[in-house]
Amino acid sequence: MMLIDGVMVKELKVIPDQRGRLMEVLRNDESIFTGFGQVYLTTTLPGVVKAWHLHRKQTDHVACVLGMIRLGLYDERKDSHTFGMVNEFFLGTHRPMLVRIPPLVYHGWKCTSPEEALIVNTVTHPYDAKEPDEYRLHPHESHIPFDWASQDEDG
């Protein structure tokens, strides 16, 4: 799959032993790392869509650490050679992956697992409640050519 300009993907390695497991998500000495502002955990209930939003300054580094999500990206940058391109990723327990999402790329996800999905996001700028760097579109009614319905759902 051709990636939207600035998007990077890292397959995550899970190391199990008799005590449990370890999964290294992001290091500051990797090319996928672009800076640190804040780390947060968000959850999404089964079947729920959290989309569409973008940031003008912030880069996201998204990893689903429990459950599964369908992550959609849309390049809104008119000066990008991938303008109008869509990327889609399935990530989580059964496919550990980190996805870097650059500024001005719309993104969102749907929880596709029967259990709640836990998503860890490491962002380059801390959240500023006075001037939030977040711009939203309706998940089902926008110009983005992405359908959140799964193939076995109606509509």
Image: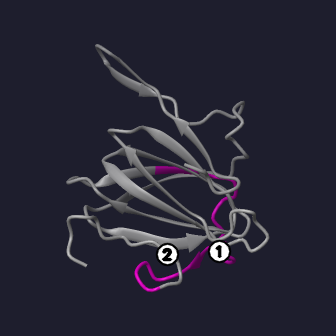
| 125 up-or-down from 52: above or below | above
The answer to which of 141 and 48 lies nearer the viewer is 141
The percent position of residue 141, horizontal first and vertical second, equals: 44, 86
- Asked if residue 110 lies left or right of residue 79, the reply is left
The answer to which of 112 and 83 lies nearer the viewer is 83
Q: Secondary structure at mark 1?
A: loop
Amino acid type at circle 2 is Pro
The percent position of residue 59, horizontal first and vertical second, equals: 67, 56
| 17 up-or-down from 3: above or below | above
Q: Which residue is mark 2?
A: 145
The percent position of residue 100, horizontal first and vertical second, equals: 61, 49
Mark 2 or mark 1: name the one nearer the start of the chain: 1
Amino acid type at circle 1 is Pro
- Asked if residue 142 lies left or right of residue 85, the reply is left
Q: Secondary structure at mark 2?
A: loop
> Which residue is farthest bottom?
141
The percent position of residue 136, horizontal first and vertical second, equals: 55, 79
Quarter assignment of residue 47: bottom left
Total numbered badges shown on the rendered structure: 2
The answer to which of 30 and 89 lies nearer the viewer is 89
Q: Residue at x 21, y 70 (%)?
A: 153
Verify whether residue 88 appears in magenta. Answer: no
Mark pair 2, 1: CA separation = 26 Å
- Marking on residue 132: 1
Q: Residue at x 60, y 51 (%)?
A: 2
Q: Residue at x 69, y 41 (%)?
A: 33
Quarter assignment of residue 50: bottom left
| 87 up-or-down from 96: above or below | below
Point out the stretch of residues depicted in magenta: 120-141
